[in-house]
Amino acid sequence: MAETADNNLRLQREQKEGIPEGLWMRCPECGDMLFRKVVEEALHVCPNCQYHFRIAARTRIEQLVDPGSFEERYADVEPADPLKFADKKAYKDRLRSEQEKTGNPDAIICGKGFIKGRPILMAVMDPTFMMGSMGSVVGEKITRTIEAAADEKLPLLIVSCSGGARMQESSLSLMQMAKTSAALARLDDAKQMFISLLADPTTGGVTASFAMLGDFIIAEPKALIGFAGPRTIWNTIKVELPDGFQRSEFLLEHGFIDFVVHRKDLRSEIARLVDFCVK
Ligand SMILES: [Zn+2]
């Protein structure tokens, strides 16, 4: 919520300053004005301070796989609204407008691709669709991808980028935590490797289930990774958190994750880990 407010403020300021939308963008970290094309060519990373911008699932897949190698799966799985949920807006209307905005049925894209010639199954969360929240479709598609990795004896990559559970699906959303975790336990029995890549932000029920169950857990620099956000923690236990708490580097230092990897090095790092495990 606070973040949306920040974004809105920034947008208002930019509009007031007469900066043309689209061509230029401001880095939220260092405040520099950046030529959008330059940022895109640098894999959506600020060339000045290395801030990693949030990217949509399809952009992420394009960045990771060998060109033209991605074959999408389960694209026909569509969300339903069994609870007939409504907050400020009916859930089914919210879904429709997010689908129109993103061109995707829900907050995840799955399929098979090649990374530096190594075949891999991947499930990639989409922060542009309802903040990558995990509802039944996200859980179902991740589970199918995990099961396919076990059946086809392929390495698995899940890219997390999520605000957590999807409150509009209530306990159906929470059940996805158990479902994906159980599927990963079976993948472990089948002795197939799972690389979990955490992007900014990875929070809530996603952190509390599959995201933290990787054989290898990689995070992008300075990504927010945690269960509850700093404000929620403050409101609940009134404890001041240490500097950099819930950022990748802090979690690495405290043993929660294995590597912090710059976006430009992800392909080589994933290929290296696959070679390390796959005979
Ligand atoms: Zn910057």
Image (cartoon, rainbow, N blue to C red):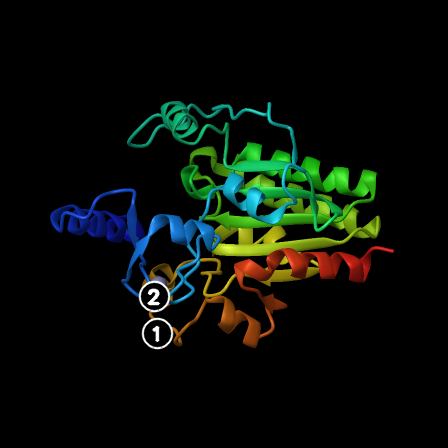
Q: Residue at x 61, y 68 (%)?
A: 259
Number of residue marks: 2
Which quadrant of the rendered structure holds the C terminus? bottom right
| Picture layout, residue 174 above or below residue 199 | above
Which residue: 49% across, 29% down? 104
**CA neighbours of label 2 inside 10 A, class few (<14), some (14 to 19), many (20+):** few
Separation of disc 1 and disc 2 at Cα?
A: 7 Å
- Residue 48 versus residue 127: which sits nearer the camera? 48
Counting from the top left corner in percent of width and height, residue 124 is at 57, 43
Q: Residue 29: where, in percent of width, then height?
A: 33, 63
Residue type at numbered disc 1 = Glu
Amino acid under label 2? Answer: Trp
Q: Which of the pair 137/153 is nearer the observer?
A: 153
Residue 4 screen position, x and y as percent: 29, 48
Q: Find disc 1 in the rendering and name its residue.
A: 240
Work out whether residue 32 can be spotted: yes
- Quadrant of the rendered image containing residue 48: bottom left
Q: Position of residue 30 (x, y in %)?
A: 31, 66
- Circle number at residue 34: none
Residue in the foreground of this view, choosing between 96 and 265: 265
Can you identify the residue that label 2 sits on?
Answer: 234
Q: Is residue 1 visible?
A: no
Tag 1 near tag 2, CB within 8 Å: yes
> Does residue 156 appear left or right of residue 81 in this picture?
right
The vertical placement of 38 against 252, above or below, is above
Per the image, label 2 sits on a secondary structure element best described as helix
Mark 1 neighbour density, 10 Å: few (under 14) some (14–19) many (20 or more): few
Residue at position x 79%, y 45% from top?
A: 154
Name which quarter of the figure residue 261 lies in.
Answer: bottom right
Eyeballing the image, is 96 above or below 167? above
| N-term mark: 1 or 2 | 2
Element type at mark 1: loop
